[in-house]
Each structure stands twice: as C-alpha cells, then as structure tokens.
Image (cartoon, rainbow, N blue to C red):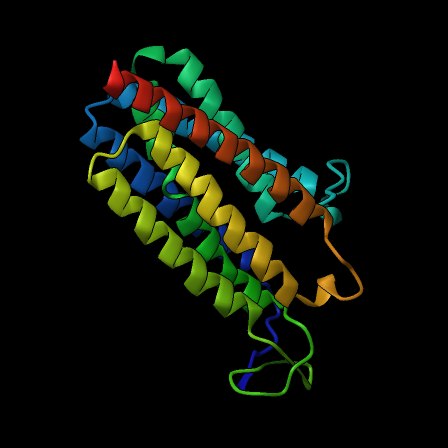
Amino acid sequence: MITVPHFERSPYPYILLSSLFIGGLVSCLLMRKDMIKKEHIALIELLNLVCTVLMSMLFAGTNFFKIGTLGFDGVGGAVGLVGGTVTSCFIFKDRWKSILSSCMVPAPLMYSLAKIGCLLAGCCRGFEYDGWFSIIYGGKSFFPAQPTDFAVFFIVFLTVLIMKLRSWDGKKVALMVIIEAGIARFLTDFLRLSHEGKVLSFRQIVIIFAIGIAIIFNMILAKKNKEKDNG
C-alpha cells in the first residue's frame, strides 16, 4: 500500500507544465533531426501548446470566466495536439510528414508524465481496492490507476519512438500513435473510479471514433502502398 500525503498546494500544475515542456523538447529534437528550420519549429510548438491547453481545459469543463474551475483533460489535450499538428502540416506542406510524426510521437510521453501529477493530486484515481500496490487517499484505498497509466503510456511512447527513429513513414507513425494510445486509454478507463456504473464513458466513445478513423486511414495507406509496389 502507498499512502499519498496531503499537499497544501497541489503539485499537479507544475508536473503538467513539466510534461508539456519535456514533450515539446522531444518534438523539437525530432524535428531538428529531420532538418526542419528552427523558426518553423518555434511556430509549430507554440501552436501545439495553445491548442493542447485550450482543448484540454474545454474537455475538463473549465469555465474560462472562473479561475476556480480550472481543469485539464488528457483526451481533450490529445484532440488539441492533433488539431494544432494538422494545422502546422497545412502551413508547412513541404515537410508535413516529418512534422506530423515528430509532434505526435511525444504525446504518450506527455500523458505518462502527467499521471505523476494525477497520482499526487488524487485525480483520475482507480476503483476501490485494498490489494497489492493500492493507493491510499484519506484513509481509503484505491487501485493504482495512475501508476498503471504511467507505465502503459511510457511503453507506448517507446514503441512509436523506435518506429520514428527507424524512419517509418511519417503518416504511419502518427496513425500508430493514435491507435496504440487510443487502445491503451480506452482500456485503462475501466480501472477508474469515475467509470463505475457506466458501460462506456464519453471519453471512450470519442476514442472509439478516433481509433476507427485512424484504422481506416491506415488501411487506405496500406492499399495505396501495395498498388504502388505492384505498379
């Protein structure tokens, strides 16, 4: 059992910002590896940061006119990141494949690191559970959902990073990020206390659509590549 102490000031915002910084740094390094101009990278990262934060807050139900309602949501952040990245791809059409994969690969890493903040803040906790590695908040024990998220998404990050470094097609790498991270997030949602009494949560429904679209695109790409090879 692991007892999480009470913090007078939640460390969550600082860990979240750190995860965004580290993810952005990884993205920058990958784009520099692909020889993208520094000024272009700066614009891309700024756009991704704004889109990620805004969509994350919207999905969390933040009221922008009330500071006390400030919140962040991982699925919303992913939607924002995809939106910002796709916009960047339209702006810099000549390097869109490199931009797409370089921006998408760090997403699972950012989510993984953010779960440390969730663990310390007590959000995204698992269902009530008193077995091995249970997390204790206020005398009650819960399943270690946040550490599970951390481990699973870090593994997802390593797999897609290897794909990127092995020079897989940028489109395929980005699609694999969506598919792998989507499946992981869909399954780990069942471990959360907030999922009790639900067949599927709203986030899981969004994920189903995202994975479905990614799989269809992947099939289309595979068919086109096969036709190209045969041609």
- Residue at 32% x, 29% y is 170
Instruction: Answer above or below: position of 43 versus 215.
Output: above
Q: Is residue 70 visible?
A: no
Quadrant location, the N terminus: bottom right
38 left or right, relative to 89: left
- Residue at 48% x, 51% y is 111
Quadrant location, the C terminus: top left
In the image, 225 versus 48, the foreground residue is 225
Q: Quadrant of residue 219?
A: top left
Image coords of residue 26 (percent x, y): 30, 42
Q: Is residue 167 visible?
A: yes
In the image, 137 versus 126, the foreground residue is 126
Q: Quadrant of residue 95?
A: top left
Residue extending farthest right: 197
- Residue at 25% x, 18% y is 230
Instruction: Answer above or below: position of 77 versus 11.
Output: above
Image coords of residue 65 (percent x, y): 77, 36
115 left or right, relative to 88: right
213 left or right, relative to 38: right
In the image, 178 versus 80, the foreground residue is 178
Image coords of residue 223 (percent x, y): 38, 24
Instruction: Answer above or below: position of 205 versus 46.
Output: below
In the image, 170 versus 8, the foreground residue is 170
